[in-house]
Image (cartoon, coloured by chain):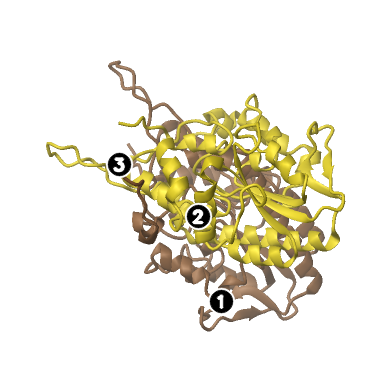
Chain colours: A yellow, B brown
Amino acid sequence: MKALIPLSALALIAACSTLPRPRPPVAEAPPVAEPAPPAAKPSSGEQWLFGSAEASVALRQDWNAIAAYVEAKADARPNASVVLASRATADAPAFLACGDRPMAAVFDADETLIWNMGSMGYFARTGIGFDPAIWDQWEKTGAGKAVAIPGVKDAFKRIRAAGVEIIVNTNRSNENYAGTADTLKAAGLGEFAHGSTLYLRGDAPDGSGKDGRRAMISANYCIIALAGDQLGDISDIFNDKSLTPPARKALTNAPAFDQMWGNGWFILPNPLYGPSIAGTMDDVFPPETDWAPPATE
Amino acid sequence: MKALIPLSALALIAACSTLPRPRPPVAEAPPVAEPAPPAAKPSSGEQWLFGSAEASVALRQDWNAIAAYVEAKADARPNASVVLASRATADAPAFLACGDRPMAAVFDADETLIWNMGSMGYFARTGIGFDPAIWDQWEKTGAGKAVAIPGVKDAFKRIRAAGVEIIVNTNRSNENYAGTADTLKAAGLGEFAHGSTLYLRGDAPDGSGKDGRRAMISANYCIIALAGDQLGDISDIFNDKSLTPPARKALTNAPAFDQMWGNGWFILPNPLYGPSIAGTMDDVFPPETDWAPPATE
């Protein structure tokens, strides 16, 4: 029997730990001797992200915006990349220089380029929140069962037509690079090669941090766009574990960073897992907004 | 004792009915005679939308895009609005003509311009999913306890500077117009006047449909942008109750509609309530993506 771990443990894959993910209530089991499996039902977040027209549209808007940005930037050929230099801070920001290196756009994979329907559906059907051993199998064998996020294929055509290399920087394990390349290819996103256009956890010494890999990629490319479903896809500076959710949010508002969103740095919606799924009642509903209905009855 | 209704009943306010919203599991009550209130904990969706840096950034990106679009469009002064004509279909699309009417941008309010921290926090703290009588009180008395969504205030400055009128089209009740205008003002979004820049449910005969109000607004304005957290904020054509979630999603991909997203029609993320929160396991996880770990042990 494997230990079952909340889905939020996906956050490990996703660069930062977080709180356990609430599971939706399940229908009552019928009164038989053998306990029946819980009735599978998608969560609200899964219904919204994977199932709704609204999310499909929102993602297409986002990927259109990324493609338009990359086209315009490729045309302008910038001198500086959008990767923060190693000792940059909100007060002393600095970006890597580009030299004459070719241009690249660097994207996270899971819930950025692909929706992991196969593994997420399996976890939902079985009532398993998250199991890292099963996720490891998913990385190895999931090809064909993950789908390209709406808008990504069109965006990739435009980005490639603009002469910009597409590079994937994912926290999937580098031991499973072949399965991940197969998964991206089967989703219709093209060929990715480990160490040149595909970087994974284990490729640099900083574990699930992605700055090390961004530095490796920057040795060969001028990175003109970064996109992902969490801030660690932009810079590890946002994943300092001492930051509360409100402090982390405030850091994105620092003037040096604020002007980057939608302007080289892009965040896509994922209400299911990752460091964004955190925070107490007071973090999420600030006390100054406390309200109750007036006692009039 | 009031009847308690799931939060998804907010969908009524939001133009379309939907499935009951799953609630997160609550901590076990201590073994005392008087049952303790359930331990309040924000749901994953609430943590993401209201609490996370990621959602804050995603919304700022969206509102920057809306403002940039409106600025460009105002400059070009279009002949046609982005409001579908009354008998338009995906196969025979048609948009209202503008004549020489002044330009306007029309936005939904709840979870589009403002986050309803006060009422949502109250529902979460008390364990009430949703109660329409309490929501009615919220419409009347919530001013100061809802917050402007990140990016909206800056976008409003730019849209107003471009000479475009901002009009709110909300499914809050027109009996509570004053409370809603107060709420928008207290959130820093400016003055709105019922029947000229603020339209509510009850203003037109089609109930929670918004096409009637869009037609009323179009009598006075050329609408160059529509934005909301659900497709009913764009056209009631998407809220035909016979549409399954996949069919509804497919309708947004019809060529006539597909080119409008991010191009006059804008959808913002809301994984908490509304017609987007619907769908069976098969709707959300299509059978062709079914996967299970290989039986290797």
**Where B81 sits versus B37, above or below?**
below
Where residue B237 appears, as percent x and y from the top left, is 48, 71
Q: Chain letter for mark 3, please.
A: A
> Helix or strand or loop: what does disc 3 sit on?
loop
Tag 1 near tag 2, CB within 8 Å: no
Q: Hey, what amino acid is under mark 1?
A: Pro
- Residue at horizontal 27%, vertical 42%? A38
Q: Residues within 10 Å of mark 3 (few under 14, many from 20)?
A: few
- Looking at the picture, tell me which residue is in the foreground, A81 or B218: A81
- Looking at the picture, tell me which residue is in the foreground, B35 or A272: A272
- Label 3 and label 2: CA atoms lie apart by 31 Å
Where residue A98 appears, as percent x and y from the top left, is 84, 48
- Residue B290 lies in quadrant: bottom left
Q: Would residue B71 appear left or right of A248 to someone viewing this image? A: right
**Where does label 2 land, which residue?**
A183
Where residue A189 appears, as percent x and y from the top left, is 57, 61
Quadrant of the frame with the C terminus of chain A: top left
**Where does label 3 land, which residue?**
A26
Q: Hey, what amino acid is under mark 3?
A: Val
- Looking at the picture, tell me which residue is in the foreground, A292 or A156: A156
* Disc on res. A134: none
> Helix or strand or loop: what does disc 1 sit on?
helix
**Where does label 1 land, which residue?**
B255
Q: Residues within 10 Å of mark 1 (few under 14, many from 20)?
A: few
- Looking at the picture, tell me which residue is in the foreground, B138 or A277: A277
Q: Chain letter for mark 1, please.
A: B
Residue A173 visible: no
Q: Chain letter for mark 2, please.
A: A
Of pointers 3 and 2, the one earlier in the residue sequence:
3
> Helix or strand or loop: what does disc 2 sit on?
helix
